[in-house]
Image (cartoon, grey):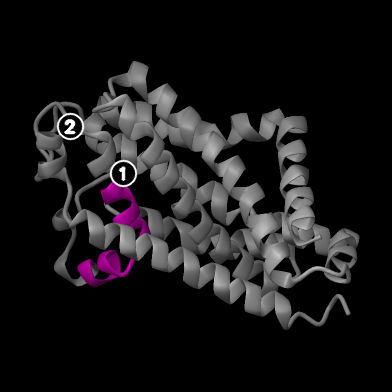
Amino acid sequence: MEWQAVYVLWLREMKNMYRAKSRIIGALGMPFFFLVFMSLGFRRAEIPGVPPGDYVLFLTPGIIGMTTLFSSMFAGISVLWDKQFGFMREVMVAPVSRLSIVIGRALGGASVSLTQSILIMILSIPVGFRISSPLMIVPAIALMSIISFGFIGLGLIFAALMNDPHGFSLIVNFVIFPIFLLSGAIIPIETLPSWLLPACYANPLTYGVDMLRFMLLDADVAHEMTKFPALVSMAVVLSFAVLTLGISTILFENEEDYQ
């Protein structure tokens, strides 16, 4: 029963994605334009920590992280719409654990997010991005999934605490842009003022983007562009995913609106 509930919730998200292809295209628009115009605009710029002419190599993992962040956080808005239309009441009174509900939602949202991130990775190749080895694609996809789970968990936390989908969009936009801009996705964090560095180090996306660069770039280039040991980055990303999914499960466990 528990795994059946997980599967049904995941399948529902997959069907929604398949039926709303325009949503996928719209979600890819902003990261793709970021990738194209910033890689062209800064291709000759001298940026500390980025070898000349290699800005597209630095930028692409950051844009993949951006795509994962945005699509994952906004997965929580579907929960609020389900609250509005009564679907969540039916789910919450079903004889399954809240953990199964959170896992089903998280798997569905992560699958949508992963689809978008892989498409951005593919679209980056004509722009000039080079993946170090095809063998690294699989671990990179696994890492993107973990990053996605972490931010889906954060989105579900907001969804559990709110009832207004429009308010959710405003709050999430207020949260995700600092996370993105302080992650080192578009500029190295060492170029930022020193008083911003603690926020960068506390930002889980910083470690996710750094780990993506480690996995996707050639060893010599990655050595220049990465800032943290790979094990540290992986530990932070995993811990963040476990923490947010755990908190969201507790919040849904204590939710009274559906009883």
Image: magenta residue range: 197-211
Q: Please check the rendered image and state whether residue 255 is part of the magenta-colored stretch, yes or no.
A: no
Image: 169 above or below 130: below
Looking at this rendering, what residue extends furthest in the top direction? 126
Q: Is residue 132 above or below residue 17?
A: above
User: Residue 184: image x %, image y %?
Assistant: 27, 52
Residue 250 falls left or right of residue 8: left
Q: Which quadrant of the rendered structure holds the N terminus?
A: bottom right
Question: Which corner quadrant of the image does residue 20 belong to?
Answer: top right
Q: Position of residue 118 (x, y in %)?
A: 47, 32
For numbered disc 2, what is the local secondary structure?
loop
- Using the rendered image of the protein, determine whether residue 185 is visible from the camera's viewpoint: no
Q: Are marks 2 and 1 in contact (CB under 8 Å)?
A: no
Determine the CA span between mark 2 and mark 1. Answer: 12 Å
Task: Tell me which secondary structure the magenta stretch mostly adopts.
Answer: helix
Instruction: Determine which residue is flagged by label 2.
Output: 218
Q: In screen coordinates, is 187 left or right of 246?
A: left
Image point (41%, 29%), residue name: 121
Residue 82 vs residue 141: left or right?
Answer: right
Q: What residue do we see at 28% from left, 58% from top?
A: 233
Q: Amino acid at mark 2?
A: Asp
Under mark 1, the amino acid is Leu
Where does the image place residue 110, in percent across and percent down from the top left? 57, 48
**What residue is drawn where x is 32% and y is 29%?**
135
Residue at disc 1, secondary structure: helix
Residue 236 in percent (x, y) is at 33, 65
Residue at (40%, 48%) from the top-left corner?
Answer: 143
User: Which residue is under mark 1?
Assistant: 212
Quadrant where the image shows the C terminus: bottom right
Few, some or many residues within 10 Å of mark 1 (<14, 14–19, 20+): many
